Amino acid sequence: MKTWLTDDILTKVDRASMAHSLEVRIPFLDHELVEFVMTIPDNLKLRGFNKKYIFKRSAAGKLPSKIVYRKKEGFNAPVSHWFEKELREIARNTLLEPNILSSCHFRGEYISSLIDEHYRKAEDHGLKIWALLNFTLWHKRFMHDNS
């Protein structure tokens, strides 16, 4: 609440909403609600690996079970879409560059199959390709180049 929420999540929400002229409300961060929740015993907030236990129990019966108990979903950057358009050739050319493959100890056939599967839409490997591309560019800049 004091670090990740304020220094990461709320900052991202604020920037994204301002960039699109949206007013965002965060009702669960109302100070009176937060103060009340801080008085609830921990065992009612978390049961084993069941997070938000009391919150989900309070919503049960008011919302469909498939909504209350669904898996949490994040908001990732649209990297899969970027690799279909703007970054398509950059990803392939950078990741399959022979010097990079040998210096980063990547298996070219694996990288190539990942990229091909992604472009054929057989599998969404966008986040894997994104991580590999970022690591490769970092490695090329700071470890590979002697300039």
Image: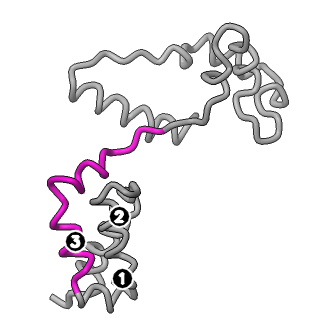
* Front tag of 3 and 1: 1
Tell me if mark 1 has few (under 14), some (14-19) or many (20+) residues whose alpha carbon lies within 10 angstroms of its own. Answer: few
- Which image quadrant: the C terminus? bottom left
- Say left or right for 39 vs 118: right
Residue 29 vertical position relative to residue 101 in the rendered view, above or below:
above
**For this rendering, which residue is in front, 44 or 65?**
65
Q: Amino acid at mark 2?
A: Glu
Percent across and percent down for residue 70 are: 62, 30
Q: Are marks 3 and 2 in contact (CB under 8 Å)?
A: no
Q: Which residue is mark 2?
A: 117
Marks 3 and 2, how far apart in space?
A: 12 Å
Residue 114 vertical position relative to residue 57 in the rendered view, above or below:
below
Q: Which residue is mark 3?
A: 92
Q: Residue at x 20, y 87 (%)?
A: 145
**For this rendering, which residue is in front, 54 or 69?**
69
Marks 2 and 1, how far apart in space?
A: 12 Å
The stretch of residues the image draws in magenta is 74-97
Tell me if mark 2 has few (under 14), some (14-19) or many (20+) residues whose alpha carbon lies within 10 angstroms of its own. Answer: some
- Say left or right for 89 vs 125: left
Of callouts 3 and 2, the N-terminal one: 3
Q: How is the image coloured?
A: one colour
Q: Which residue is mark 1?
A: 109
Q: Are marks 3 and 1 in contact (CB under 8 Å)?
A: no
Q: Which quarter of the picture shows residue 28?
A: top right
